[in-house]
Image (cartoon, grey):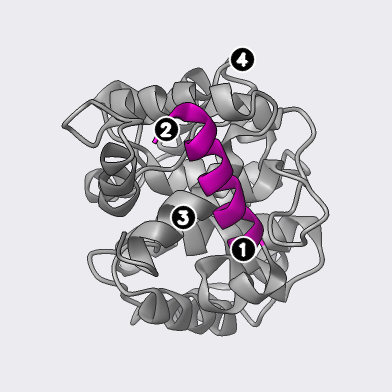
Amino acid sequence: MNEKDIKLFLNKKVDGYNQTSFIKNDPICIPHLFSKKQDIEIAGFFAAIFAWGNRTTIIQKSKELMRLMDNDPHNFCLHHSSKELKKLTGFKHRTFNATDLLYFIEFFKQHYGNHKSLETAFIKHGNTIEEMLNGFHHYFFSFEKAPTRTKKHIAAPEKNSSCKRLNMFLRWMVRQDDKGVDFGLWKNISPYQLICPIDVHVARVARKLKILERKQTDWRAALELTKYLRTLDSKDPVKYDFALFNLGVMEKY
């Protein structure tokens, strides 16, 4: 396919998948359970961090955690008692365990004790997504007694990670259209700045379409893919995540 055909093909897929019917079977359904900004941020962050493997399990474990936090995550993070924290000690999702969870809660307590939005944790570190993600990683683990094991759950471009889950979270928070899927809560990051979330499924489809040459699925691949997607839509390149992900996962393209 030439570039014109690729654009028509992917735009059609975006139109098909960027619909509210998409929400219920995707981890984005977790932040959609809430209406308060901070609850959406926290629920979305956990759902994004949990988002590897089977999507049904991801959603189930995210809902389980929200119940343990009394379906009031912002209030829980700020005002939990030691007794309430004990309820979390049995929680586990794949390699994410109670040690990781308790540190995440501590981070949110510290951050929201001083800031109204999680957006601040990203934008204060620079103007590019790469600078924001690297800065966020250092900030996230800057609090006392940050467990070494927990660092594997927060990716960073400086480690050449694709940062798929964090880029997905940023898409949820930043992108805004009239489709009702992404939230568009954050106004200090523009959609055109975003980097497309890339995993094995997205990368496979992109290589098949010949819009990605890099063989490794890493940060450089995410940048290469996004650079191409900006030629299709300079203002909102990451909308094509809907097309590429679902072509790979749903349609086995």
> Circle 2 — which element?
helix
> Circle 4 — which element?
loop
- Residue where numbered disc 3 is placed: 104
Q: What stretch is highlighted in magenta?
A: 1-18
The reply to whether the C-beta atoms of the residues labelled 4 and 1 are less than 8 Å apart is no
Name the residue rendered at 70%, 71% in the picture: 20
* Foreground tag (3 vs 1): 1
Indicate which disc residue 216 carries: none
The reply to whether the C-beta atoms of the residues labelled 2 and 3 are less than 8 Å apart is no
Vertical placement of 220 versus 197: above or below? above
Please identify the quadrant where the C terminus is shown.
bottom left
> Circle 1 — which element?
helix
Whichever of labels 2 and 1 marks the residue nearer the N terminus, that label is: 1
Q: Quick check: is 3 in the magenta stretch? A: yes
Q: Label 4 sits on what residue type?
A: Asn
* Foreground tag (2 vs 4): 4
Q: Is residue 180 left or right of residue 149?
A: right
Vertical placement of 132 versus 149: above or below? above
Name the residue rendered at 79%, 48% in the picture: 177
Picture coordinates of residue 75 (x, y %)?
Answer: 72, 67
Indicate which disc residue 137 carries: 2
Q: Nearer the viewer, residue 185 or 235?
A: 235
Q: Is residue 213 left or right of residue 177?
A: left
- Residue where numbered disc 1 is placed: 16
Whichever of labels 2 and 4 marks the residue nearer the N terminus, that label is: 4
The answer to whether residue 30 of the structure is visible from this angle is: no
The reply to whether the C-beta atoms of the residues labelled 4 and 3 are less than 8 Å apart is no
